[in-house]
Amino acid sequence: MNGAKPFDWRHTPGLSAYTALIFVFFYAPLLILVIYAFNSSRLVTVWSGFSFKWFVAVANNGAIRDAAFNSVIIAIVATIASTAIATAGALALERGRLRFGRGAATALIAMPLVVPEIVVAITTLIFFSGLGMHHGLINLMIAHTVFCIPFALLPIQARLRDMGGTLEEAGRDLYADEWRLFRRVTLPLLLPAISAGAIMAFVVSLDDFLISMMVSSAGSTTLPVYIYGMMRLGVTPEVNAISTILLAVSIVFVAAALLIGRRNKLA
């Protein structure tokens, strides 16, 4: 029939209710965790009043502060290293003279995104053990750097593709050498994507558990691993408070990455 309306999946009966149920399933546990982080009772599931005392207890816990410090140091180093490597890799893939193997190289770099993290963690542990490397924080920094590279690479590579080569060719026509061209043209245009990739790498490193658990040693415990150790004795209000802090930090950084990525698309 010529007058029939084209199919629109958004008007599928029950789609809105089904979508709402999915969101409730995903986010209701997080909401409950945050609410009970402010519970004054020692019993996790019994509400007895609003209080910040568990956040104060977390702040006064030296072991938690040490674990958080390890996580932040590892995340900062991994972010800087992985973003630098990702920027160089994206430039090589998109502006290099590779004629063959470009797709294979991209797939190899992105492999940590598709390989189960437990496999990456076990192979990393075997690799370090085979080399006799037992350096605690240094091992974690290296492992997190490798794991974070694809998270930093993808937005930078996408930005390079969207940019095209017109402005860079114009710079060459004006007799700019490669370093000046990169510093004056390519890098300023890439900064939003580099920032978004760095933020994503930082969040991934900060929240990582499996690799940290496998590779960490005495004195290099990260905050997610420390939380896991606390939960083996049962969920406590301190666990809810720490988890709420990590959730808030992750939301802030992910939102910043999305905003930067949106500006990147509009630029």
Image: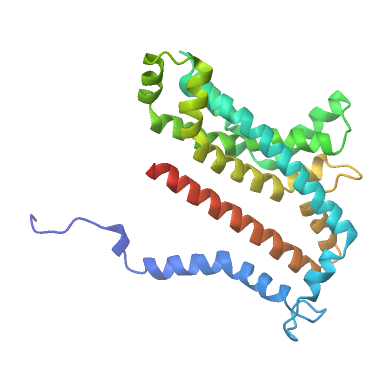
Residue at 63%, 55% in the rendered image: 250
Residue at 83%, 52% in the rendered image: 67
Q: Quadrant of residue 152?
A: top right
Name the foreground residue: 253 vs 179.
Answer: 179
Residue 14 x, y percent position in the rendering = 36, 69
Name the foreground residue: 20 vs 179.
Answer: 179
Name the foreground residue: 163 vs 209.
Answer: 163
Residue at 44%, 65% in the rendered image: 19
Q: How is the image coloured?
A: rainbow
Residue 28 x, y percent position in the rendering = 59, 70
Residue 54 x, y percent position in the rendering = 80, 72
Residue 185 x, y percent position in the rendering = 45, 27
Furthest residue in direction bottom, as rendered: 48
Note whether residue 236 is visible: no
Pick the quarter of the image with the C terminus: top left
Pick the quarter of the image with the N terminus: bottom left
Residue at 69%, 65% in the rendered image: 244
Q: Quadrant of residue 116?
A: top right
Furthest residue in direction right, as rendered: 218
Looking at the image, residue 110 sits to the left or right of residue 94; the answer is right
Q: Quadrant of residue 172?
A: top left
Looking at the image, residue 252 sits to the left or right of residue 129; the answer is left
Task: Reply above or below: 166 against 26.
Answer: above
Note whether residue 168 is visible: yes
Task: Reply above or below: 25 against 88.
Answer: below
